[in-house]
Structures are given as C-alpha cells and as structure tokens.
C-alpha cells in the first residue's frame, strides 16, 4: 500500500490537482484557502507549470477562461467573497462549454462575513451564482482523503462534460490535517481530444471560436436546451451520496462535508442512547442525489438537515422527500459549527414526543 | 499588377459597423499584419464587449470572446498555456479603460507578452453614445448632455501616457487612421506590436484614435475633421514607450 | 489505544500548533487514525491559539473536539476556557509558570509544570511546549518515547536537523517532571 502523508486539506487539494495533470493555476489570496496558492507557487515552477497571482479574483477567473479555452487543465481556488467575484466568469465559462475546476473553501457571509468555516454558499454553488441558465457539477468532500480523490475526478468530469466543476469545502476541511494517500484514483472516463480549443489553426483546420454570445434568441435557446440535455445525463449518472446506518433509522440526518462527520459523532452517541438515527451525506451537491431520500422517505419518521448555514440544502432535501416525511433543520452560521451535543439535543427533542 | 484584395486573415463576412466608422480600417490593418507575418495559423485573438464584440466573426484565426473588460486576462490565460501562439486583444475605450482598467494595467505591468489593439473613439458606441473614460472635457454625450464637466465627471484617461510608466511595457504608441499618412503609420505600429510579441519583448499596445460618426452626430467627413481638431490635440500621436529606444 | 481527543491551547507563538503536529505525527508513525484541526485567522498573530488533535483506532468522525479527554494549556485564558469542557476522568496539564490558578475540578487529573521556567533554565525559552509535552507523555502514557522520536524526525524542518536534538532534550526534560 502506498505510504500515507499528513497534509492540510488545502495543500492536498493543490497536490491532487497537479497529479491530475493541472499545470495552470490562477488565483488571488484569501483566507482560509491561501495555502492552495502558496503550494502552487512553490510547486508549479518545478514542473514547468504556471502559477500566476492575478490582480483580482475577476482577472483570475478570466485567465482560467482563456487557459481552459486554449485546452489546458486549469484550477482556481478562492473563498466565499472571492467566489462571488468569480461568478461572472463562471457564467461565461459555463456558457462557452469550457472545462475547469474551481475550489471554494467556504467562510461565513454575507459580505466580508468572517473567516471561520461555513456552508452558506450552497445556493450560490448549486443554483447559480452567476447569471443565466447553467449548472456546475459541485463536489463536497468530507475528509482530506476524499478531497484528493474528488479533485482528481473533478478534472475528468470537467473535461468529459466540458463544464466547470466546483469543489466545495469549508475552512475546517481546508485547514485540518489528516493522513492521505495519493495513488488510489483511477479515471473511469474516456476523454476526447480537445479539438475545439483555440491553439491556433496551423492552417490545418477551420478556426475555433470560444464564445457565449448568441444574439438570435432562437439560436441561444437551442444551445441552452442542448446543454440541459447534457445536464439531464449528469443528473442520471453522476449524482452520488453516502448512506450511514440508514437501514433501521427513525430519523435520517442530511448533512454534507465536514458537518456530516460531526453528525456521525452525534449519531453514534444517539445510538448509544437507543435512538435509531442514520445519515445521508450528499457527495455531489449538484446534481443532488434524490434516490436515497426517495428510498427512505416512507420508512423514516422524519429527516433532519444539519448545515453550517441558515438552511440552504434543506430545500433540495424537501424536494427529494416530496412531502412524504417531515424535514426539520438544525444549523449554525457565521462561522459557528454545530456540535455533536447540539445535534444530539435536537434529535432528542424530535424523538421526545413519543418517549 | 497589384490588386486590392481582402486579406486572407479577414473572413468573408460583411462587417456590421456603421458607415464612416474606423473599426473596418483597423480590422484590415490587423489582418494584413497577420498575413504579412505569416502567423494566421498560430494567432489567437480575443474580442471585447463593445462595438467590436463580433470581431470573432471577422478574423480568420482562432478567437475567444471575453467578458466586458477582461480581454487582457483571457489573453494571459491563452498565452500562458501556449506561449508560441501569437495572442492579441482588440478592445474599445469602455472595455479597456473603464471596466477593464485593472486587467489592462496589470497585464502591462506583468509584461505579458501579448499585443493590444485599443480603439479610442471617446464614446460608448454599442450602447448608443454614452460618456467614455476617454470622452473629452466639454464633449456632449447621452450621459454628459451638457458636455463633460470635469468638476463632476473628472478627466479623460490617457492610456498610452499611463502605461508608458510601466517597466513591463515594450511598446505604447498612439496612432490615428484619419488620413493615408496616419493609416500607414498605424499599420507600421501594429506590425511592430505583433513583431515584438514574436520576438518575446513583452506587452505592446497600439492606441488608435477613431471616429464614431453615428454617436458623435456627425457625417463621416465631419467626424474625421472633429477628430483632427479635438482628439489629436488632447491625445497627441506618437510613441510613448519603446523598449528598443529607436524612437 | 482508545480514542484520545486532545485540545492544545495557548498564545500564538508558544508552539501550540507544532506540539499538536508532533502528536499527529505520533499517530502517523504508529498507523493510527487521526485528525489535526487548528484555529486560524488573525488570532494566530499573538492572540490565543488552539489545536484539536484526535488519535484513534477507528476512523475519526468529528474532527472538532467538544469534550477533550486531554487538555494541554499554556496560558490562563486557555485553562479557563477549556477546563469545564474536559470529559470526566480526563487529564489536564498546564504551564504553572504562566497560569496562576490551578485546576479546580475534582473529577479530572490536573498536573502543573513550570514549563516556561524550566525552558528558561535550559536556555531554550521557546521550547516550553516540548517540556510540557514530555510531561504529558509521561503522565498519560498515550504514546511512548520511541514513537515520539520517530515523529520528531517528521516535524523538524529538513533544513534544520539540529533542532531534533534540541526538541528531544526538552521532551526528555519534561519526562523527568
């Protein structure tokens, strides 16, 4: 077995990107993801790659656009306020069918907010952020190891579907260290050559144009509808989640990222007290994996969504449960983290009525 | 016998520009340059948002359309991936000198090895004639209906003068295409700006003073006269920075 | 090994994160499951600073510790903040050179060590953290010294190998107390 190393989530993210063949990083410093840029600044020159500290997040995402359009595997990373700035560019990238990977190590908002971990950018990541009809694939790792695996996969997904993929972590995941191995990911997708890239025609082919402007509404509608057919395929084949102790559960917690791990601790303690609690952990936030919710919605007494926000993913949980069971919420926000004790108390209150 | 022909690097698509607009001339000069340098197969252009937004339709090379003001950042991405490509941006005054000032200045400061063609016509054309960062003091536009009042609306940006202070800039030159002599000068400047990139000299910008008869409310001929009498005195033509020093 | 949930806390600059990293690497070299979660942000610049380290035989669920089994406190505010959170039967070690009050709880074990004073006496004023760590290891037995030695090779910067002996001496000094 390959030897494990102890690494911060942010550094592991950066190394995984390099191992995935990413040789271009454009970014702007922001807490709590700056280690990504620092790692890239150190490593990229050694392997003939490019690290460029842009003048703003806006410039950085547009450099990503240019580099992706030129056919490269390219990464940018930021944290919440910076991702707001990148949202314009992300819309253009989606509208031009360009592949790239964007990391958001989420901190508390709105505005400058704070710098402590949060999940309050769920809507921004899964429902838009930028303007127009578009989606990104959004992957939410819960450990440093899963961060590594998903970053590598993100580049394949981006190239395969020709679209932006977001890795959504939080300050906790970015800053924490865990043992991690880098060798385990194998691509399952056959990737086509990027014949659409603007690499110069060499006078051997027709010119390639990277563009999202279609002034004729009929033409634009047709393109967007085509893109949504692709999204349907992705919903069908890429939605993913982890189930934990759901089989006999009376209450199933829905939580993603690090807070799913905090929830697991609460679940163990609840089980010690005789409460049957399970967990569904969405791994892809978009597409949202409805299937496990549909499967259990008639078996459980209720669902509990736990988030580091005022309640954003709960809307997708409710859509998936479709009124077949109550969906309750517990969350902290602004950089506060729900503790296992708080979650346990909420679970006990929910079960309280019949005990 | 020489025949006047469309440069190969211009597509056979009819330009959408207004009568008397200078964009067509500058497009042609850029295309001639690409032909003459034999770089059509390696050139990648970046189109702006503004009147030249459809420039990606007109150049017979790979093109990317950038978000408003972001062309130098997009060009940076392209150039960093394939340094052997010749990468140029084609931008207007709103795109380059208002919303995209930061991208322009920083690409220049980095000495990004790209070529920037900057059309300065002192007005926003595509949106219908609003005040630009380069609108002259006293100039009437839709959003300076009483003439640009420098007390409240500030002064125009002199881009070549500004950029000439930066060490990363190889060439900053201001030209015009209002007469044959100036067109010839502009062609030379554009060609030098592309050659600089091939020679890896760094950031080159050619500012071309241009007319906008439609939004200036003048006939094409009057517009040329207005440019000579008003714009050139405020924005003197010439080389503001040339790293080679052969000024 | 049971699960050890350790909070290390003190002022920025006292080497709290480094001490936590040493524990994390002890987990690495003995093939344990582990997590290391630092506080971060402006508070790192001279303010209070803490670090959560979990060492376990099972995969770590919550990396955030709310009921530490061990508290390693290097200043007064840290002891005040975390003493009440220590699990019953838990262990608290603190630097009595910097903390005037003691452990008030009776359901936990409290050990005081004048680590900063001992560090000054050794002319290693910045290594009170390692002296306190030595004492922690001795009193809790959560790891043995051979494991610590292996882990220390991983946390000492490759460019400054001389720091290995300096740190180890301080740990050994702490183990005498």
Image (spheres, coloured by chain):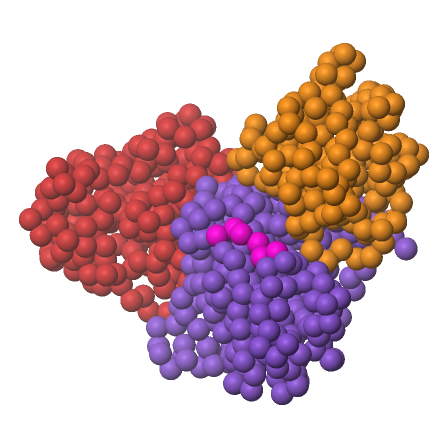
Chain colours: A purple, B red, C orange
Residue A158 percent coordinates (x, y): 62, 65
Q: Is residue C134 above or below residue C66?
A: above
Left or right: where A189 falls relative to B79: right
Q: Residue at x 26, y 54 (%)?
A: B22
Tell me which corner region of the image, top left, top right, bottom left or bottom right, holds residue C57.
bottom right
Report the quarter where the N terminus of chain A lies. bottom right
Residue A171 to residue C44: above or below: below
Can you see residue A286? no
Residue B102, horizontal then vertical, whole percent = 38, 42
Pick the quarter of the image with the C terminus of chain A: bottom right
Q: Is residue A40 magenta?
A: no
In the image, residue B154 above or below residue A230: above
Which residues fall within the magenta stretch?
A334-339
Q: Residue at x 34, y 58 (%)?
A: B49
Depth order, front residue of A125/A274: A274
| Location of residue A219 in the rendering, given as x and y in whole percent from the top left corner | 40, 79
The answer to whether one can see residue A262 in this image is yes
Name the residue at the right extreme.
C146
The residue drawn where x is 66% and y is 45% is C85
Q: Is residue C169 left or right of residue C70?
A: right
- The image quarter in which residue A43 lies: top right
Taking the view exactly as shown, the residue that stands out farthest to the front is C106
Camera-side residue of A246 and A68: A246
**Magenta segment main secondary structure:** loop
Which residue ends up furthest to the left in the rendered image?
A: B146
- Picture quadrant where residue B116 is located: top left
Q: Residue at x 35, y 61 (%)?
A: B53
Q: Could you tell me residue C25's position as x and y percent?
A: 81, 40
């Amino acid at each position: 077995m390959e030897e494990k190393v102890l690494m911060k989530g942010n550094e592991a993210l950066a190394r995984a990107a390099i191992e995935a063949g990413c040789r271009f990083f454009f970014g702007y410093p922001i807490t709590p993801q700056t280690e990504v840029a620092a790692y890239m600044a150190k490593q990229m020159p050694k392997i003939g790659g490019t690290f460029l500290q842009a003048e703003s997040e806006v410039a950085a995402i547009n450099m990503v656009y240019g580099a992706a359009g030129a056919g490269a595997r390219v990464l940018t990373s930021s944290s919440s306020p910076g991702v707001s700035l990148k949202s314009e560019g992300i819309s253009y990238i989606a509208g031009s069918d360009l592949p790239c990977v964007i990391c958001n190590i989420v901190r508390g908002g709105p505005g400058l907010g704070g710098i402590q971990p949060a999940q309050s950018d769920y809507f921004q990541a899964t429902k838009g952020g930028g303007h127009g009809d578009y989606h990104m694939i959004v992957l939410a790792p819960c450990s440093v190891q899963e961060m590594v695996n998903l970053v590598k996969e993100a580049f394949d997904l981006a190239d395969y579907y020709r679209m932006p993929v977001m890795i959504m972590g939080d300050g906790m995941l970015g800053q924490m260290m865990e043992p991690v191995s880098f060798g385990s990911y194998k691509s399952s997708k056959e990737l086509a050559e990027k014949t659409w890239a603007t690499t110069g025609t060499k006078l051997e082919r027709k010119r390639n144009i990277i563009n999202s402007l279609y002034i004729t509404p009929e033409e634009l509608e047709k393109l967007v509808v085509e893109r949504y057919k692709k999204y349907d395929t992705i919903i069908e084949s890429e939605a993913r989640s982890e189930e934990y102790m759901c089989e006999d559960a009376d209450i199933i917690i829905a939580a993603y990222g690090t807070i799913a791990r905090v929830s697991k601790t609460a679940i163990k303690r609840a089980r010690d007290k005789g409460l049957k609690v399970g967990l569904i952990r969405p791994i892809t936030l978009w597409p949202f994996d409805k299937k496990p919710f549909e499967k259990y919605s008639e078996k459980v007494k209720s669902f509990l969504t736990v988030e580091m926000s005022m309640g954003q993913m709960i809307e997708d949980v409710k859509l998936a449960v479709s009124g077949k069971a109550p969906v309750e919420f517990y969350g902290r926000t602004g950089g506060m983290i729900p503790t296992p004790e708080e979650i346990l108390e909420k679970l006990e209150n929910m079960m309280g009525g019949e005990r | 016998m020489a025949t006047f022909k469309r440069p190969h690097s211009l597509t056979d698509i009819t330009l959408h520009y207004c009568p008397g607009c200078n964009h067509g001339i500058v497009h042609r000069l850029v295309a001639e340059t690409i032909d003459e340098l034999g770089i059509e197969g390696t050139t990648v252009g970046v189109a702006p948002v503004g009147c030249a937004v459809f420039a990606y339709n007109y150049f017979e090379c790979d093109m990317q359309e950038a978000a408003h003001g972001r062309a130098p950042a997009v060009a940076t991405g392209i150039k960093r991936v394939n340094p052997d490509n010749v990468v140029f941006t084609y931008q207007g005054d709103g795109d380059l000198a208002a919303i995209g000032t930061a991208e322009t200045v920083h690409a220049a400061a980095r000495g990004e090895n790209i070529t920037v063609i900057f059309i300065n016509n002192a007005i926003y054309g595509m949106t219908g004639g609003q005040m630009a960062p380069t609108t002259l003091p006293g100039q009437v536009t839709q959003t300076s209906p009483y003439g640009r009042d420098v007390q409240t609306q500030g002064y125009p940006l002199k881009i070549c003068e500004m950029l000439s202070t930066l060490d990363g800039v190889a060439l900053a030159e201001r030209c015009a295409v209002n007469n044959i002599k100036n067109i010839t000068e502009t062609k030379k400047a554009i060609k030098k700006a592309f050659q600089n990139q091939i020679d890896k000299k760094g950031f080159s910008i050619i500012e071309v003073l241009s007319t906008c008869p439609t939004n200036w409310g003048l006939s094409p001929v009057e517009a040329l006269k207005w440019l000579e009498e008003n714009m050139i005195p405020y924005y003197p033509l010439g080389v503001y920075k040339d790293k080679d020093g052969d000024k | 090994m049971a699960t050890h949930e350790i909070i290390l806390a003190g002022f920025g600059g006292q080497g709290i994160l480094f001490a936590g990293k040493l524990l994390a690497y002890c987990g690495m070299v003995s093939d344990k499951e582990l997590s290391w979660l630092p506080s971060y942000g402006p508070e790192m610049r001279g303010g209070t600073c803490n670090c959560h380290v979990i060492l376990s035989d099972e995969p770590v669920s919550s990396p955030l510790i709310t009921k530490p089994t061990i508290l390693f406190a290097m200043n007064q505010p840290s002891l005040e903040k975390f003493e009440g959170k220590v699990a019953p039967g838990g262990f608290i070690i603190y630097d009595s050179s910097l903390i005037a009050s003691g452990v008030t709880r009776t359901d936990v074990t409290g050990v005081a060590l004048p680590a900063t004073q001992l560090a000054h006496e050794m002319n290693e004023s910045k290594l009170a953290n390692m002296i306190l760590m030595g004492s922690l290891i001795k009193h809790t037995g959560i790891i043995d010294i051979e494991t610590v030695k292996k882990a220390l090779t991983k946390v000492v910067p490759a460019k400054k190998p001389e720091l290995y002996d300096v740190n180890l001496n301080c740990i050994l000094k702490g183990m005498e107390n």
